[in-house]
Amino acid sequence: MGENRGFSVEEISKNFQFKGEFQRCEPNLLGHINDTYAVCYSEGSGRNHKYILQRINHDVFKEPIKLMENISGVTRHMREKIIRAGGDPMRETLNLIPTIDGGNLFISEDGDHWRAYHLVCGARSYQQVEKPEHFYEAGKAFGKFQGLLSDYPAENLHETIPNFHDTRMRFDALVEAVETDPLNRAKDVKEEIEFVYKRVDDTPILTDLLKKGDLPLRVTHNDTKFNNVLIDDKTGKGICVVDLDTVMPGLSLYDFGDSIRFGASTAEEDEQDLSKVWMDMGLYKAFTRGYLEMAGDSLTKLELEYMPFSAKLMTLECGMRFLGDHINGDTYFRIHRPGQNLDRAHTQFKLVADMETKLEEMAKVVAKI
Ligand code: GN1
Ligand code: MG
């Protein structure tokens, strides 16, 4: 496993404090950035242990050491609060496994950066919402996550990817891709480019409100895809938020908006049949209810007001990033087939257009809850 890329997961595993003997590993191909493996170990007594081993994509995360400082600080903070609240710290937050020399990062001879977590058993993530209750649970989980980190000292966090949700800068990056056009692909995506250019005035709205001090800076997750919440197999509760690489100071609206972008869609992110793609109001309601139940009291009036817009903006931003990556030759988001980033851009733009017709209805939902 992974040998074709020049490493063996079993060999890498030896550098972590895993218990017992290596049994097997399985790749998890769902993320677009890092390489993830589920690793199974077994002790003589027949006791099994499961771990998550990840190779951090250092083209995307340029400073893995700082990134791991963030994650170890944030998980320790959440762990303590979960224990104080009488929760289960092994299931409600990720827990890092140290390397054999006690660090949290193993750097291989090839310069790859690896880290490991306990795998949370009896829970899983979903690529698409199957039951609205699951999405309500995800809303609660992300709302709770924000609460757990509300007193985390933001000055202790490194910005793992600067300007991550600066939508205006993402727009500029798209313009640059179109101008550079290394593979001569821009000519085939004129309509898509036009779709984005028409909405340029939307792009600086949230960051401008932040700069003016109208929206508060918080510690946020910044990648709140539904598949980043583990849903308990038995209870259906959203127990643990994963993928902490982009935990950084940000806006609550980035987290809310990105959740809706991914989870309230009626289709997968790379669906090719666009007639299947729209934003489902029932799902929107379910998430919003869960999120506001947990985080509503701490949100300002302006944050509440911009929730519908943030869903549209985060969807537009993600679509711009997929389109830009398609034009640049798929160098950022992993693809499993040619044209996949363009397909992803298409679903995002379809969602944006659909949300534009529903913004008022979306605002009513927030007001009602
Ligand atoms: C990436 O790593 P993954 O697949 O959870 C990306 C997000 C995008 C998302 C789109 C570090 O997330 O920003 O919203 O793809 N992560 C990074 O599915 O760029
Ligand atoms: Mg991610």
Image (tube, helix red, strand yellow):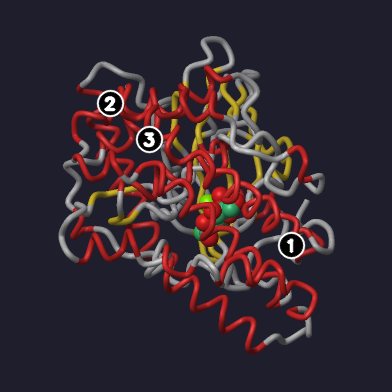
Position of 246 relative to 174 (above/below): above
* Residue 128 x %, y %: 65, 33
- Mark earlier in primary sequence (3, 1): 1
> Going 19% across and 34% down the picture, which residue do you hit?
298
**Label 3, ligand 1: CB separation under 8 Å:** no
How many numbered discs, if any?
3
Give residue 261's position: percent from left, percent from top. 54, 44
Which residue corresponds to the image point at 27% horizontal and 31% vertical from the top-left? 295
User: Dot 3: what SS?
Assistant: helix
Q: Earlier in the sequence, mark 3 or mark 2?
A: 2
Give residue 48's quadrant in the image: top right
Which quadrant: the C terminus?
Answer: top left
State the SS at label 1: helix
Q: What's the CA distance linking mark 3 and mark 2?
A: 33 Å
Residue matched to label 3: 363
Q: Amino acid at mark 1?
A: Leu
Q: Nearer the viewer, residue 232 or 277?
A: 277
Q: Earlier in the sequence, mark 2 or mark 1?
A: 2
Considering every residue shown, the one lying at the far top of the view is 234
**Mark 2, residue position:** 82
Q: Is residue 170 left or right of residue 74?
A: right
Q: Which mark is residue 342?
A: 1
* Inter-mark Cα distance, 3 to 1: 30 Å
Judged by depth in the image, the label closer to the viewer, 3 or 2, is 3
Q: Amino acid at mark 3?
A: Ala
Task: Nearest to the eye among marks 2 and 1: give it.
Answer: 1
- The spot of residue 251 in percent (x, y) is 30, 52
Whether residue 295 is situated above or below residue 251 in the rendered picture: above
Q: Residues within 10 Å of mark 1 (few under 14, many from 20)?
A: many
Question: Would residue 341 be visible to someone looking at this image?
Answer: yes
Mark toward the viewer: 3 or 1: 3
